[in-house]
Amino acid sequence: MSAIVDDTFGKTIVIETIIIVTRTNRQQMAACGEGPIDAQTVGFLLISGFSMMSYASTVEPFRAANVLAGKTLYRWSIVSIDNQPVVASNGAVIQPDSCVGDMPPLGIIFVCASGNPSEFHHPPTYAWLREISRRGARIGAVSGGAYILARAQLLSGYRFTIHWEHVPAFEEEFPRLPVSRSRFEIDRDRLTCAGGVAALDMVHTIIAQDHGHQLAAAVSDWFLQPHIRSSNNIQRLSPPERFGTSNKRLLSVLEHMERNIEEPSSRDALATDAGITTRQLDRLFAAHLHTSPMRYYMNLRLDRARNLVLQSSLAITEIAVACGFAGLSHFSAVYKRRFGYSPRRDRQRQHLPTQSWYGHFSRP
């Protein structure tokens, strides 16, 4: 089956094989009878292209808490920008209960955004979030939702996190807001997580704070989550797991490269930093990564550049400089050689009418 849905930015998208989640009585899904009058309402502001996995990992523990407690501790309410259905990254359609501008009594509001949150510009949403905050609600964000909180000026002075793939673009736009690399952060009335299954860990902590460790542990046990990760755990795999090697010298070079994108180090400097000769450096890369050090380094910088091309509004010249390219023509040439399109054309392709902005680039 198919449906035509207008997304947040006014584009018409044809969605094939969609799933419809009905508007009414989401709370009845808890199947646990009438709850107390003071049950906390958790709001979810869904931005077009939000990750269904991140949303489900956030809302489902609250439902489980209701079931396991035998009463309604939490209710939830879905909010959209314009009271229209919101399309998730997997094509599922969620019907909202209210829209930006309404003022339901919320205890928490989570902004769920994925794909390319840097493209979201909606001043009424920013004003609404600030008003919700003034009324005493805890303000949260999932995956790329922190981007929207930053634009709403709701993160200054707070610890917060965002999905690691959004970090480069975020730091370029908000250089004075230090981003935590942790899985989630709970700092007073700000609740942020990097998305994916990290939301399970964050909501475990919220339930424990609200209703005790025993219920939170029961919820995690129900979801087959034997290891609860704290906010101190990092988002990404360890370097040996991520790079597929345990060679300490090679790992040292790879981490050095990741830290030095804007001002790339020379081959000699890489070898010196690792305490080896350039010939040994070449042999390490050939044996473990089947490429040369400088080719790997170039691809790393180009991958960072593409992230900024697709997930930020920075000018192409700014992206070139941020990724260590002195000349725009050279940057465009090597970018096209690697990805098949020039940076400008690659960005334009993301906005073609036949391609929804959340499609290929949606994140956990």
Image: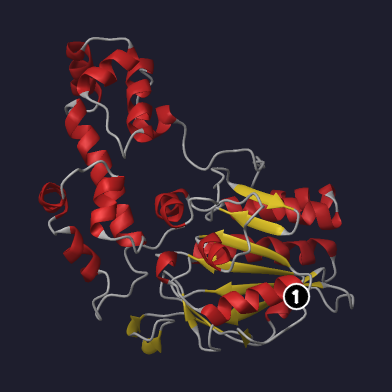
Q: Report the residue at 19% width, 29% height from top.
A: 294
Percent coordinates x, y for residue 303 in the rendering:
27, 47
Q: Position of 56 compared to 202: left or right? A: left
In this rendered view, identify the residue nearer to me: 359 or 261: 261
Crowdedness near tag 1: few (<14), some (14–19) or many (≥20) residues, C-alpha within 10 Å: many
Q: Vertically, is 144 above or below 76?
A: above
Q: Vertically, is 316 above or below 81?
A: above
Task: Kindly tell me whether residue 135 is visible in this rendering.
Answer: yes
From the image, tell me which residue sits under label 1.
Answer: 106
Percent coordinates x, y for residue 53 in the rendering:
51, 62
Give, as a three-letter code, the residue at label 1.
Answer: Leu
In this rendered view, identify the residue nearer to me: 164 or 14: 164
Q: Report the residue at 17% width, 12% height from top.
A: 279
Q: Report the residue at 58% width, 50% height from top.
A: 198
The quarter of the picture where the N terminus appears is bottom left
Percent coordinates x, y for residue 265 in the rendering:
27, 27
